[in-house]
Image: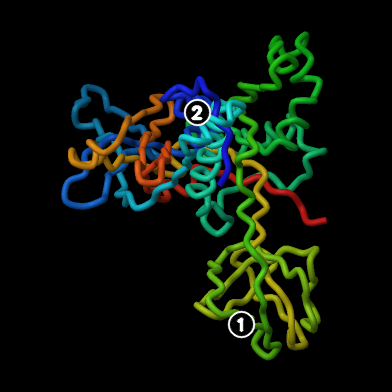
Amino acid sequence: MSNTIASELQLTTVLDSALVAFRRAILPLQQFATSYSNVPLRGDNTMAIPYYPLATSDSVTRASGGSYKALATSTTTQAKKVVINKNKVQAISFTSEERSRQPMFNPEMHGRLKGEKLAFDIIADIFSPVRHSVFTGATISATTAGNFDENDVADLAQKCMEDYWPEVGRSLILNPAFHFNLLKQGQIIDASKSADPLAFREATIRRILGFEELGTAGLPTNNGTAFAVLGEADDDTFTAAAHGLLDGDRVIFPTLTGGTGLTAATTAYFVRDAATNTFKVSATIGGAAVNFTSDVTAGTCRRYENIVGVAAVPSALLVGFAPVEPTPAVRSQLFDYRVVEDRYSGIVLEYKHIGYGDTDEEVQVIEAHYGDALGETAAMKLITTPLS
């Protein structure tokens, strides 16, 4: 591996630059997830993550002269155990010769790139359980980026109100195409109408119809990889070894040989009757199995969530961060070790600066130890695009 290192490289330059980019890229996480950190783990790797459920007890009527105390109901702070069993690392290494002979290396740029990539990878991993089979709440119809405007946001807000979402804490997270088409709407970009010049100057929308809006390139589509399938027409069943699909997953068939009654590529179906190696499909979630009248002798299937945005409150996903601090003996072998917590997102990163005398090499590492779990499946609504 070849690197060019600036002569004025400071010990924490990579860390400082990485943190700036990391904090910016990780913003979506704090919108759809509740993060908890720095809780000492004793005896196992589990952490209890507190969150606030959407529902609460009904209001009651007090009879004249009745007791207020008797009408009091308990508040509910839910908690779910999360196993801290994941970690993500970004690192840079270089030799003394590279440092002294290659003065053009830009540590700030490499730090930013690595910090941003670490954030995107953590988001993609935490967001991976998000699919139609899990978050089934009412949402807007699939739409294209070019047609997505403030009317769609209003429709989403209506559905949130109808589902009794709290008015505080609602977020709207969009991929770049949807974010910028929404930004182009006259009601938003025209400061004389929105009274917000930042839409034009900074390409940010911030508050819109009760949502805190955020555009990001780090929102995964959660589409899967195509795999081979065969289909039996006599019972409308598909066979694929260890396919990993769940009931309710949205899928397409990119290619089909046979399978009369099915449409390849341009029609989405929903998985039903999923077993380890078999499944059926329906036209709607929970609907009747689609009947096909000829065997599928060759074909491919692909999970196709095609998520382009979400409306959410933070209880949708739960995340815990807990560093694995080195023992005193190990720490004595490190040139530098730091634990950095972002107080806004709750994310904890570790920084290690290591020297290897035998290879005349040093390594700088940023690392996150974390775990995640589903929170409230009613706390997120998916935005998708139609198949072309």
Q: Give whichever of discs 2 and 1 has the lower sequence position.
A: 2
From the top left corner, tell me how far across and down residue 202 is, in percent. Answer: 69, 17
Q: Secondary structure at mark 2?
A: helix
Quarter holding the C terminus is bottom right
Q: On the rendered structure, is 348 left or right of 324?
A: right
From the top left corner, tell me how far across and down residue 191 is, in percent. Answer: 75, 11
Q: Quadrant of residue 323?
A: top left
Q: Secondary structure at mark 1?
A: strand
Note whether residue 164 is visible: no
Whole-Å distance between the Cαs marked 2 and 1?
44 Å
Residue type, mark 1 in image: Thr
Note whether residue 134 is visible: yes
Tell me if label 2 and label 1 are in contact, CB under 8 Å: no
Disc 1 crowd, CA 10 A, few/some/many (<14, 14-19, 20+): some
Residue type, mark 2 in image: Arg
Q: Which mark identifies residue 239?
A: 1
**Which residue does the image show at 49% across and 44% down from the upper left?**
122
Compared with 212, 376 (above or below) is below
Disc 2 crowd, CA 10 A, few/some/many (<14, 14-19, 20+): some
Q: On the rendered structure, is 255 left or right of 32?
A: right
From the top left corner, tell me how far across and down residue 324 is, in percent. Answer: 28, 43
Q: Which mark identifies residue 23?
A: 2
65 or 305, nearer to the observer: 305
Residue at the extreme bottom: 234
163 or 258, nearer to the observer: 258
Q: Which mark identifies residue 187?
A: none
**Which residue does the image show at 61% across and 29% down from the upper left?**
214
Q: Nearer the viewer, mark 2 or mark 1?
A: 2
From the top left corner, tell me how far across and down residue 359 is, in percent. Answer: 40, 46
**Which residue does the image show at 29% across and 27% down from the upper left?**
62
